């Protein structure tokens, strides 16, 4: 079976802040069809890694290779519409980009926001806003979707619906997905690969193998007790705070 082509290849990325490593020797590949979930404690360097991938900041050393046909769709971790600026969902989706009306309508139908196009962006619920942001990301016709905590601040039902939509888009469009998430239940169910980051890559692999990794269990001991009570954990890896 042929190996899927790499879309992004990261090799030995290092980033320091005040003489402390934010990222140290980080290497991985994102290939066509991958669904990689990036997990790690707060302050582990996840947001910095995303910014480097997007070209917003530069690593101190290391290299990033990007495919010539790379098209990235991105949803940020934090986005709050300005309550004093009236803008409709339709106008927001067209902001700073030219989108064909038919393609916009198709994409809006895919994400289930076709009934919100005339609504004011500032009046949307959290779940509606996340779907609008996902729609805008898809209007770039991406072969890579980078989603930074897309279900943050949503209730359980909203989280489930959004994750199901992301999984459907991944399968239907065969785009690679790199998603930052703290939801271990979804990590185990949806990902083709899990990348566990704590400044360096602690472990990386298929969800079922990550569950048995001592470093993963050390970082997420509290959640794992509830999530996988049947697994025996071996805590032999310690991270200094």
Image: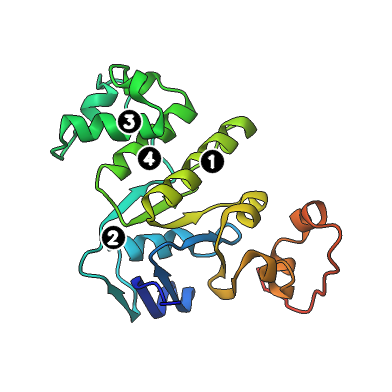
Q: Residue at x 53, y 42 (%)?
A: 163
Say left or right for 41 vs 145.
Answer: right
Q: What distance separates the C-alpha of mark 2 from that of mark 4?
A: 20 Å
Q: Which residue is mark 1?
A: 164
- Is there CB contact under 8 Å for labels 1 and 4? no
**Nearest to viewer (mark 2 / mark 1):** 1
Q: Which residue lies most toward the left here? A: 98
**Nearest to viewer (mark 4 / mark 3):** 3
For disc 4, the neighbor class at 10 Å (few under 14, some 14 to 19, many from 20) is many
**Nearest to viewer (mark 1 / mark 4):** 1
| Residue 144 horizontal/vertical position (percent) | 35, 57
Q: Secondary structure at mark 3?
A: helix
Q: Is residue 126 above or below residue 225?
A: above
Q: Secondary structure at mark 1?
A: helix
Q: Which mark is residue 56?
A: 2
Q: Which residue is mark 4?
A: 134
Q: Which mark is residue 108?
A: 3
């Amino acid at each position: 079976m042929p190996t899927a082509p790499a879309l992004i290849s990261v090799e030995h990325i290092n980033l320091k802040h005040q003489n402390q490593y934010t990222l140290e020797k980080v290497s991985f590949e994102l290939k066509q069809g991958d669904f990689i979930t990036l997990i790690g404690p707060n302050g582990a360097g996840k947001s910095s890694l995303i910014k480097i991938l997007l070209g917003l900041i530069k690593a101190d050393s290391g290299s990033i290779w990007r495919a010539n046909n790379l098209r990235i769709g991105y949803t940020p971790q934090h986005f709050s519409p300005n309550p004093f600026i009236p803008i409709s969902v339709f106008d927001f989706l067209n902001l700073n980009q030219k989108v064909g009306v038919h393609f916009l309508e198709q994409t809006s139908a895919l994400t289930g926001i076709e009934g919100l196009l005339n609504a004011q962006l500032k009046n949307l619920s959290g779940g509606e806003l996340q779907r609008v942001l996902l729609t805008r990301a898809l209007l770039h016709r991406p072969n890579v979707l980078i989603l930074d905590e897309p279900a943050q601040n949503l209730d359980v039902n909203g989280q489930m619906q959004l994750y199901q939509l992301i999984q459907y888009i991944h399968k239907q469009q065969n785009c690679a997905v790199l998603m930052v998430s703290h939801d271990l239940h979804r990590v185990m169910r949806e990902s083709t690969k899990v990348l566990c980051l704590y400044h360096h890559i602690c472990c990386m692999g298929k969800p079922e193998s990550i569950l048995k990794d001592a470093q993963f269990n050390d970082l997420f001991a509290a959640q794992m007790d509830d999530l996988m009570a049947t697994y025996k954990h071996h805590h032999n890896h310690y991270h200094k705070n």
